[in-house]
Amino acid sequence: MNVLYFCKPHYNCKNDCLKTKRVIAVSNNNLYIENPWIRIPLSEWNVLTKGLQPLSVKKDRIVYEQGTELTVVYIVKSGRIRLGHFTSEGEEKGIFVADVGCLFGEACAVPGYPTYYTATAAADSEIYVVPVGDFVNKVMETPELSLNVIKLMARKMRIYSAQEITLSFHDSISRVCQFLVYLAEQYGENDATGIWINLHFTHEEMANMINCSRVRVSNIFASLMKEGIIRKVDGRYQILKYDELLKITSS
């Protein structure tokens, strides 16, 4: 089963991991930084999606709002869904991004709890909608499916824990660099000069994920470009000094 893959750049396996895009965490001095972009082979959910037609969701459309009592769970077929919490002032704290193959909504739908998070399409997406009763029955009937769900929920718990630690002990520069490491893991493409990030994002989106102001994020990007650690070409960012980013994340 293709579930857990780890990238250890200091052991020179970075290129292969990035090429296959199977990385879920990066090892830095024996500490694993959990990647909040969750991408899983769709085949792991075949027993749930068989016979279902996906629902199309346009970018920026809300799939469900925090406080909603869900009666279904979701699986991303294409695109990306952002899970985040909004304050009463409208400020968002991003939690994780459900990429292709990610199951979400299960932690609330199964026990019948109201959701903590709002799910918003970060890109034009297609999602499978599975009634919670069908989901529970399939999980109880299919050991392999049950194991996949357990592993995914354990991974989400590690993401939540890692975010709590990061917000408690890391400064904004370190958090920005971790964000770039995450993107390199999930969407990176190597060439002779560095790692291209094949995903368009805004500084505001990054700020929401790391609980930082947009202005501060923009200033940090300007500093990283001035130091030659990253550059931007035709709307895409390239990491020129990956090892330098890793050093900053542990500072």
Image (cartoon, rainbow, N blue to C red):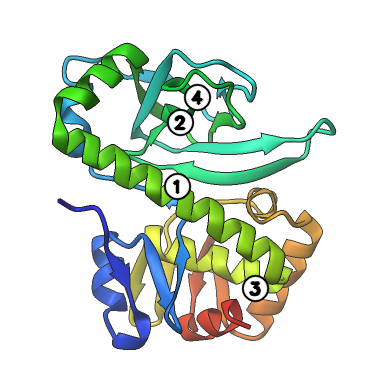
Mark 3 or 2, closer to the camera: 2
Mark 3 or 1, closer to the camera: 1
Residue type (three-letter) at the residue carrying disc 2: Ala
Nearest to N terminus: mark 1 or mark 2: 2
Confirm or deny contact between disc 1 and disc 2 (CB under 8 A).
yes
- Classify mark 2: helix, strand or loop: helix
Residue shown at 19%/53% (left/top)?
2
Judge from the rendering whether residue 74 lies leftward or rightward of residue 206; answer left or right.
Answer: left
Residue type (three-letter) at the residue carrying disc 3: Ser
Mark 2 or 4, closer to the camera: 2
Residue 172 in picture, x, y percent from top left? 72, 68
Query: Where is mark 4, residue-wise?
Result: 58
Q: CA distance from mark 1 to mark 2?
A: 10 Å
Residue 174 is labelled as 3
Nearest to N terminus: mark 3 or mark 4: 4
Residue 107 is labelled as 2
Relative to 88, residue 191 above or below: below
